[in-house]
Image: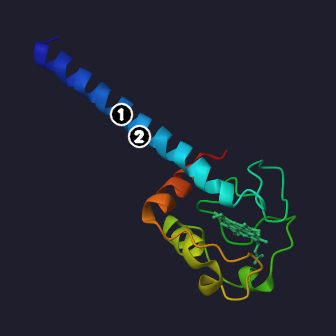
Amino acid sequence: MSKITVLAGGLLMALSVSAYADERMKVAAGEEVFKRCHACHSADPSKNTFGPSLTGVVGRKAASLPRFNYSAALRDSGVVWTEANLRKWVENNDAFVPGTRMRHVAITDPAEQDYLIAYLKSLK
Ligand code: HEC
């Protein structure tokens, strides 16, 4: 192996380690933001509490958990929880889906939205 190869390999490893650390930091920050949701949303996949479980929510169709009594508004919304839609939801949920049963939340800071989404993605 040439010196260049070793150097490049080392650099690549350092980069991926730092990307991993960055993601871990976002998830940890998101867990803090999620404290504003926790009263109603359990992070336990088997649990719906006052709100539906959010485990696996990123990419899921809105109002699609079988054992949660959603509002008609959310059931009929046709929304899929893409990252973009999750941002709109946490920024102003009752404007995004008028008639939703979820109390208004206003996570308007894009960085906080980033953290929250990283945290939601980490829920398995
Ligand atoms: C006061 C209780 C409450 C709080 C606080 C709350 N939620 Fe909710 N959430 C609900 C309820 C109730 C629903 C179901 C709404 C409906 O059926 O219209 C819901 C639905 C959702 C959904 C749609 C899930 C699905 O299966 O379609 C998402 C995503 C969500 N909430 C995210 C959040 C996030 C993120 C926060 C924190 C920033 C939060 N919620 C704070 C009560 C709450």
- Residue 58 spot, x, y in % from top left: 59, 59
Residue at the (52%, 69%) spot, across then down: 87
Q: Locate residue 71: give its quadrant.
A: bottom right
- Residue 61 spot, x, y in % from top left: 66, 69
- Residue 77 spot, x, y in % from top left: 67, 83
Residue at the (51%, 65%) spot, across then down: 83
1 and 2 marks in contact (CB < 8 Å): yes
* Residue 102 visible somewhere in the drawing: yes
Above-or-below relation of 18 to 7: below
Q: Secondary structure at mark 1?
A: helix
Residue highlighted by disc 1: 18
Residue at the (52%, 51%) spot, across then down: 118
How would you rate the neighbour count of disc 2 (Cα within 10 Å): few for under 14, some for 14-19, many for 20 or more?
few
**Toward the viewer: 91 or 76?**
91
The quadrant the C terminus occupies is top right
Q: Amino acid at mark 1?
A: Ser
Which residue appears farthest toward the top when viewing the image? 1
The quadrant the N terminus occupies is top left
As measured in the structure, the alpha-carbon distance from the residue carrying label 1 to the one carrying label 2 is: 6 Å
16 displayed left or right of 102: left
**Toward the viewer: 104 or 22?**
104
Does any atom of ligand 1 lie closer than 8 Å to the CB of label 1?
no
* Residue 78 visible somewhere in the drawing: no
8 displayed left or right of 51: left
Q: Amino acid at mark 2?
A: Asp
Q: Quadrant of ligand 1?
A: bottom right
Q: Secondary structure at mark 2?
A: helix
Q: Which mark is residue 22?
A: 2
Residue at the (78%, 79%) spot, across then down: 101
Q: Locate residue 64: give its quadrant.
A: bottom right
